[in-house]
Image: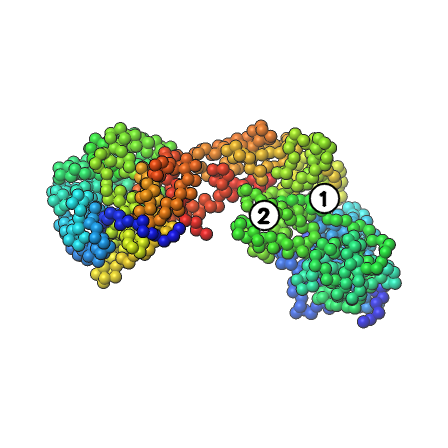
Amino acid sequence: MLPRNQKKIRNFAIIAHIDHGKSTLSDRLIQMCGGLTDREMSEQVLDSMELERERGITIKSQSVSLKYKSCNGEQYSLNFIDTPGHVDFAYEVSRSLSACEGALLVVDASQGVEAQTLANCYAAVDLGLEVIPVLNKIDLPSAEPERVLQEIEELIGLDCSNALSISAKTGAGVEQVLESIVSSLPGPKGEERDPLKALIIDSWFDNYHGTVSLVRVVDGKIAKRGKVKMSSTGGVHQVEEVGIFTPKKNPVGELVAGDVGYMIAGIKDVKAAKVGDTIIDAKSVGTTALPGFKEEKPTVFAGLYPVNNADYDSFRVALEKLSLNDASLRHEPEVSPALGFGFRCGFLGLLHLEIIQERLEREYELELITTAPTVLYHVLTTEQKLVKVENPADLPDSAVISEIREPFIRARILSPQDQVGSIISLCIDKRGLQQNINYHGRQVLIEFDLPLAEVVLDFHDQLKSVSRGYASLDYELLDHRKADMVKLDILINGDRIDPLSVLVHREQAKYRARDLVSRMRKLIPRQMFDVAIQASIGSRVISRETVKALRKNVTAKCYGGDITRKRKLLEKQKEGKKRMKQIGSVSIPQEAFLSVLRVGS
Amino acid sequence: MGAPDKTLVLPPLSLYVHFPWCETKCPYCDFNSHALREALPEEDYCHVLLHDLKAISHYAQGRQLASVFFGGGTPSLFSARVIAQVLEHADKQIGLQENVEITLEANPGSADVTRFSDYHSAGVTRLSLGVQSFSDTQLLALGRIHNSLQALQAVDMAAQAGFAHVNIDLMHGLPEQSIELAAQDIDTAISLEPNHLSLYQLTLEPNTQFAAQPPTLPDETTCWQIRNLFEETAASAGYEQYEVSAFARPGGHCSHNLNYWSFGDYLGIGAGAHGKVTSSNGIGRYAHEKHPRRYMAMVKANQSGRNLKLASAEEIAFEFLLNALRLKNGFRLIDFSQRTGLSAECILDTVKNAANRGLLNISNNRVRATDLGYRFLDDVIALFLPETD
């Protein structure tokens, strides 16, 4: 093992919007440093999950340690930490960034800066990282490097005089990227002889090793067979293996200050190695943890139900497996008279929800029904107690509610100028409060405070649609604010269907009620009796529709002793009915429930 | 549900004889009937029927036939001689009860007094006329070969030929049928004074011409009003509804059909005919090959599908209910046990559940559909379907 020289280590991240070429660039860097042979280079090495590749997004942080011989003749270790790029994973991004001394800001030379890039770049600057602007895709005819550089300077306030222009696809300029990393980014500062402090960038579960943590050693060292402690929980673990990713897992004897690598320490539960936590020496007392650790709390909630009730057990097992790998995914059993047995899950955001749903469907081949996402309400009771409500069905009786508070976010929307009007109307429709509007060249940065409940429904789709796909959105949670919310109940022939209750703003109640009731009316088949569908606030019915009763079955003539056909016909009809849920004596098809549960507005 | 036990009693026995040919195939018809494209193989088919009859006669197990039904297709394409031969052999091989009911279906399009008299002389006691409607427009739309005048004459000829028992088949919910047109149909039928009416709604069955090119049918409300009108008019003229589509004046009930509905035994001969036989092994069924030519070839080769397939207890219970609940008076629990060999316990939960929903009525150990249940009989019967998972 060569003695390691901290000055010759560079820890860096890449900040980029989806499709701006982060994966292509990282593959190029790995290739040029000989991390993998051509044969081993499958496309886009780092996004290893099928889903990541398909969506072109990074869900889990990963890293790769590269050997690079600079033109000054020195050998450098470059630790590239790949970060998730989405707002849902903002916390993980900030942890990844804080493990680095520098970052490449990769911007598509024709598309320009997007909201997400902006947020992550601000985070990097706030954490004191040196940022190198890189214009990618300059080989495209539509590239406008000057305009985009101006945008970067104006929007982010970054000096672009040393910006690089490259094409990760053709490889043009990539060599300069490596040189720039070596010459412009500072090396790590930590001290190997100081007490151990290492940051957990990410943790995941591996069937063979248990929890594997990606760590950045800030001070001291982690050695094989040493004992370490988690500063937030106090849990002590024996280190079984440490190593670096090249990108293959490559065990080493120890990780020292400045290194980025993995640690395996016989940890069964990923929750015992939380992202952002500080690993310290087992015997250490009084070592201060690294700053910035916080527990990730879900902000968006939804019920997930297997379409076939028989899949419940495999669904439970799948969720448990995913939770092993995802400390922020929460799940609790839930029973819905309409949908059967399922789980109420908590997510970091909508994308997180979608990813979990897709992974369950793909990797575990489950067919799932996902209910409309809801947010965490704070309910102040008349006794001045604060109750947190994830599910509208759990709302306390209206008589004891003094106030309902809903979560608000600060949304930053970056869009070309000509879409501004429609974006502002959309935000106002969603009960948004305008905070700021700034013009930067062709781009406009619009800031709005919005209720999260409105955003989790279909705000993102609507934003894309009113801006013809150009606007990008980033947001952060602000606070809970008092809101005039009412609980809208759905009743079928007088029976309240609890899981269909929704919390809506009073001003929207009437419209939502009419919409929900008419959607259900269209999907409930006629039966032996009239079916009344009502929406009410408390005992006041604000919308009602009726599915008129059928007159009778059309019973054909029965003949010749051949009962097999009649029987088959009835069996077929019965199969159809089986998919329906019985509420009292009313048969309701699942689609009718879904029309209410799935879409919000 | 256990195996059939000793409560199983040999029920009455009837014989069904199927004639699978018609002059033309009606666009709504999904029965086993085939348009006649060549000369009717009268002799050959008769020969095969007699052969078939002989082969299944042992299923009678000592019982005589309570009824015989010549159905189709169009049995009246066949001469009285064929009918007489079948009856003669049935009497010889199995035996006809003294008061045996013998029905023959006839098409008004080929009605003829002499022909009808010959059937009567051959032993036929009851004539069932496939009138369907007395409106020429409707008959045309239904693709029938007869017109309204022939329909009227056919009923008249049946009486002239000496038939005391005549049934008129009348359909409703016909293409573009108005309430007024329907009222004329039922009034005309009743004015002819048959002692039996079969009133049923036109349904579009799969694999028919109407299913492929659906005609415009009256809306649900109109059909409902016509149905009510039919039932009320029939009732006030002294026809009592005893089954979903069967109405009779006193003494006019069709015992052959009643035997199906009360889960009696029946033998079937002819193409596609089904049989149901109770024996010490349980209740079994058989079904003949449907295609006329193949059926004939199989019988001649002594390989016709007449081997009994034993039905499971669940199937039997369901089939009993499928039939018996069609009867206005339903069934007694003892009938269920005797005809199925099963304890009434096995249906009681479902019966009670349906009773709680106002669909069935149980009193004095008799189960019958309520008015609501009778209107939604398919839904009620489906409650008794065995669970399929």
Q: Is residue B85 visible?
A: yes
Q: Is residue A476 above or below residue B60?
A: above
Residue A29 coordinates in the image, percent (x, y): 73, 63
Q: Quadrant of residue B310?
A: bottom left
User: Which corner quadrant of the image does residue B368 belong to?
Assistant: top left
- Dot 1 falls on which chain? A
Helix, strand or loop at disc 1?
A: strand
How far apart are the two marked residues, 2 and 1, measured between alpha carbons? 30 Å
Give the residue pinned by disc 2.
A342
Q: Left or right: A102 with respect to B20?
A: right
* Residue at left offset 38%, top offset 43%: B381
Q: How is the image coloured?
A: rainbow
The image shows residue A84 at horizontal and vertical percentages of 71, 54
Q: Is residue A560 left or right of residue A590?
A: left
Residue type beneath disc 2: Gly
Where residue B38 is drawn, which disc sits there?
none
Residue at the image position 67 percent from the left and 47 percent from the top: A347
Q: Residues within 10 Å of mark 2 (few under 14, many from 20)?
A: many
Q: Quadrant of residue A176?
A: bottom right
Q: Nearer the viewer, residue B112 or A45?
A: B112
Number of on-image labels: 2
Question: Along the line of sight, which residue is nearer the eye, A264 or B224?
Answer: A264
**Which quadrant holds the N terminus of chain A?**
bottom right
* Residue found at x 31% / y 47%: B338
Mark closer to the chain start, 2 or 1 = 2
